[in-house]
Amino acid sequence: MRRFTQRTLGVLVALAAFSASLPAPVSADGDSERFREIYEREWAFRLREFPMFASYVGVHDYDDRLGRVSETDQARRHAFWKAIRAELDDISCVRLGTEDCINYRVFVQQMDNFIAAYETRAHLLTFNSDWGFFMEWARLPEDTRFGGVEDYRNYLPRLHQLPDVMDEYITLMRQGLESGMTQPRVILSSRDEPIRAQLVDQAEKSTYYRPFADLPESVAGGERAELLALASYYAKKIDGRLPLLFGHLPRQPYGVAPVPDDIAPFYTAGRYVPAPLDALRGGYYWVNTHALESRPLYAIPALTLHEGAPGHHTQGALALEQTEQPPFRRFDYISAYGEGWGLYAEKLGLEMDIYETPYEHFGRLTYEMWRACRLVIDTGIHAFGWTRRQALDYLASNTALSMHEVTTEIDRYISWPAQALSYKLGEYTILRLRREAEQELGPAFDVRAFHDHLLSLGSVPLDVLSEEMTRWVRGHQ
């Protein structure tokens, strides 16, 4: 008995020593706090590096700066994001709550995208057929918050920095030319017009002088006014019927305005331009009034549903209001989610009885056909070697789009691979999730609650969207 006791005691001592040598288990709270510290540190870095983005999200600490883009700046950001990504490997979604796990997955994807963009030299492609840094600069007078003297004082240093940052962009573009990393020449027709518009012989004529001139924007021409008036009519009609399908609507309003003249010749038919929550204006639904013969009125209801409410404005403005979410998630935009929602919103016009005439129903269907053709063209150009002429002929032969719209759209697809695919993949996912929810819940399905929950998630990857909406359905069974 004594020998057994001594042996047992020895085993217990050994076990105690072994247990003491083991690391303490990591608590869920510890992982959550660590993750928060990481993403808050990265977000602060992101705002410092991209001052114009900081201004947009309502952080005005850097309103007197422009983001720098030299190779040194690109490498510094890459090194920082690589270090952040390494830290994230020590955190597990298993040890996080549901919301934090979603945040973690979105954040990891953002870091991977930032890192991949540098490693694939994507920063050498400084513009595409649709947008570029020089267009963003031309928006400075409109996008800057001018609420007091300090705002004007901050605006001037940004203008002073434009030449230096322009030189950095030119250096990147020259590196792109040397390495073969450039946009196709064919999509660049007229893309120098926004730059030419900024070359003036008197400061008072400059785009950048507008804040000091206080000149009101005017709408000229009866037909131009008719197009804008029709868009405004449908915007208000839709507003009155949104409660049929939504329980929670954004506080921020939006207005209707023409696409700026300097970019209208090659711009899309419409676009939603968001506003920060602290802006002294709402968002804007831009309607293109250039080349009016190519802007059929029967397409306005579908376009308004997509760009305004319940499309991009409703989705984007509600995302900004999700203040409990970390900023890297609130201010992200995933095309598959956002554009998928835009296409879905066009179909909601049927449920809200927005389309008034057979022509307007035809307009919605022409948009459906257009998006179907985009799937073919996107893969044709980027996977099967289609020429620009093939793409132009295909879109012109299979849709009711004007040749002006056909040309601007094809140039957009050439310079923006897979964006067209993201539209339909997102729409298909949302339609599938609604269909499944209706089947699972039967009479208990509440379309308003379904939409409210989907939009409350903000812009998330499609796999996260599917999982969270499936979880929502289970919670309502």
Image (spheres, grey):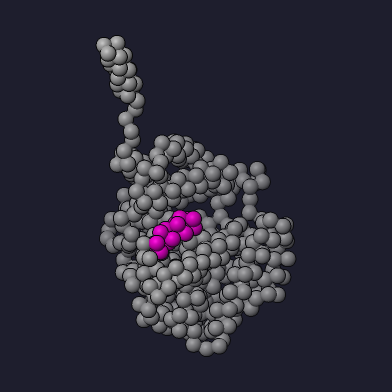
Q: Which residues are magenta?
A: 458-474
Image quadrant where one finds the N terminus: top left
Secondary structure character of the magenta stretch overall: helix
Residue sticking out furthest to the front: 1
Say which residue appears at 44% left-offset and 37% top-offset.
89
Q: For residue 256, what is the image quadrant?
A: bottom left
Residue 293 on image: x %, y % = 59, 81
Q: Is residue 462 magenta?
A: yes
Residue 143 on image: x %, y % = 39, 62
Residue sticking out furthest to the top: 3
| Residue 31 vertical position relative to residue 395 in the rendered view, above or below | above
Indicate left or right for 310 with 184 as reference: left
Indicate left or right for 383 with 450 as reference: right
Q: Is residue 384 magenta?
A: no
Residue 457 on image: x %, y % = 39, 59
Could you say which is closer to the camera, residue 1 or residue 29? Answer: 1
